Amino acid sequence: MKPTLEPEKLRAAMRAWSAGVTVVTAVHEGHKHGATVNSFTSISLEPAMITISLQKSARTHELITKSRAFGLTMLSAQQSNISDLFAGKMADVADRFANLETETLVTGSPLLVGGLAWIDCRVVQTFDAGNSTLFIAEAIAAQSAGDGLPLIYHNREYWSLSQL
């Protein structure tokens, strides 16, 4: 079936959508990786479940598929450099975790210190979604920093919030 909408047209339309920025991380057999992700949402409080979407070609996708677990760090407004790092904008960096402080909760997935909140997840279901996979996961542990401003991404730039 031929797509009815060119990918660039959808990409241009999605630039109008503002989203918080997260880094999704996974570890499997000693290999760890992470990716900047804004396709994340809470889908259920009872049971506690979230969803993320990752391109199938992403290394983080492979590790989540193998480990069936991932960690999610919600970035603070001061962490745009970390977002860029995990988005692959610093191609000369071999180890994205070098010089970053991490911690773990339950699954062993690394969580980035300095974020606003952290969720540790176990994958319960996956759905094929074109060139991506939709991961449905049970949130098995969560922590919050309690305050701070989120990193916001809108129209290919970082923004900060202001209260109306």
Image (cartoon, rainbow, N blue to C red):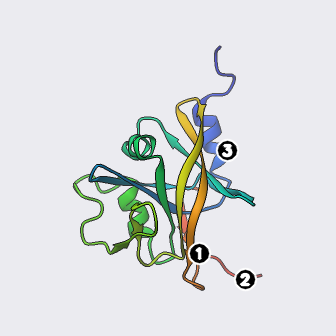
Name of the residue lying farthest toward the bottom: 147
Name of the residue lying farthest toward the right: 164
Could you give the CA–CA distance between mark 3 and mark 2, rounded to whole angstroms?
Answer: 25 Å
Counting from the top left corner in percent of width and height, residue 6 is at: 62, 28
Pointer 2 residue:
163
Residue shown at 54% from the left, 76% from the top? 116
Q: Quadrant of the C terminus?
A: bottom right
Residue 9 placement: quadrant: top right
Counting from the top left corner in percent of width and height, residue 21 is at: 54, 63
- SS for dot 3: helix
Comes first in the chain, label 3 or label 1: 3
- SS for dot 1: loop
Q: Is residue 153 visible?
A: no
Q: Quadrant of the N terminus?
A: top right
Pointer 1 residue:
160
Label 2 neighbourhood size at 10 Å, few (<14), some (14-19), many (20+)? Answer: few
Residue shown at 44% from the left, 79% from the top? 114
Residue shown at 65% from the left, 47% from the top? 14
* In this view, 45 is above or below 6: below
- SS for dot 2: loop
Comes first in the chain, label 3 or label 2: 3
Name of the residue lying farthest toward the top: 1
